[in-house]
Image: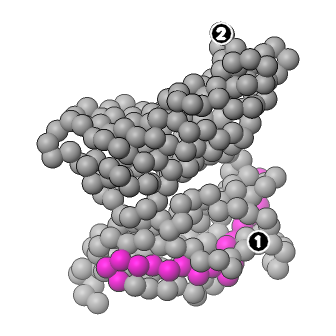
Amino acid sequence: MDSQEAGTLQLPLTASSSDGKVYRLVGATFNVTGTQTVTVTDTAADTVMVPLQAGSYTIELAPGWTMERVDAPGAPVPAALLSPNPLPFFVKKEEPTQVRFQFKLPGEGSADVGFEVDSGGWFAGSFLLDSAGGSIPNPYEELVGKSVPFLISFKSYTTTRESWGMTQVRTGPVTVQFGGAPSAQLERIAAALKDAELFLSLRTVSGSTVEFSNANLFSPSTGIMLDFFPGFSSFLGVVDGDGFPVFRPFSVDAPMRINEPANSAVGLSSVNASP
């Protein structure tokens, strides 16, 4: 491999939580495909370093992994993989590239291989873009007709009661991930929306019927917005004694759009959300 044309994939495999617990991903196998094809099985180090030719790739976490606390080796911690799998990424010459897989640790928060532990939640699912508008050529045209898995994860959130039985959920800074084939356009969107706040609104319709009103992420510096808005989006939820929705896990189908100053794309999403 020509070192002048190579970069490095970094896979840190340990993480510390805010209360000092340290977790490790054990027995992981990573299948890397793209400009090169590589299988990574030696995951004994705290950080795995994989030299790769510059180019586009996907990385898949194969079945058979477990999550453990470092102070309790051999005792797996229940964990669920949230991130799209495989995940796309790009390697640039003479630069490190870090890939993160996000997990949920029931009762203990969440973790990502890349990798940190927290007590947040997620807004995740997939979307299918059906049209793109704006400049010609439009950078979203390559995504029209393709199903794209996504994950918006957050470490914390607050809720506020609004008028008309509406609850506003405001998260802390988010991490955005897209699955599917490598896309420079989606990589740009994810980078622009990193550390934005997700605003999510729920409204009581009647009884325990709750309507998903909207959810959006916005980057003031770039003008990029990812927006989900009402469709056939009512579900049987949890309502408190005063008639306001409580943020609990839910699933809906909802129209969505990606907006920026010169271009836009719209489609339909299937979403599951959880605190």
User: Quick one: which residue is furthest to the left in this view?
Assistant: 136
In the rendered image, the vertical position of residue 59 relative to residue 158, given as above or below: below
**Dot 2 corresponds to which residue?**
163
User: Quick one: which residue is furthest to the front in this view?
Assistant: 232
The secondary element bearing badge 1 is classed as strand
In the rendered image, the vertical position of residue 10 relative to residue 250, given as above or below: below
In depth, the one of 178 and 141 nearer the eye is 141
Mark 2–mark 1 distance (CA, rounded to whole Å): 45 Å
x and y percent of residue 271 in the render? 58, 43
Residue 200 visible, this angle: no
| Residue range corresponding to the magenta coloring | 16-36
Q: Is residue 48 left or right of residue 1?
A: right
Circle 2 packing at 10 Å, graded few (<14), some (14-19), many (20+), is few
Scheme of image coloration: one colour
Circle 1 packing at 10 Å, graded few (<14), some (14-19), many (20+), is many
Residue located at (82% from left, 79% from top): 74
**Dot 1 corresponds to which residue?**
68
The secondary element bearing badge 2 is classed as loop
- The image quarter containing residue 251 is top right
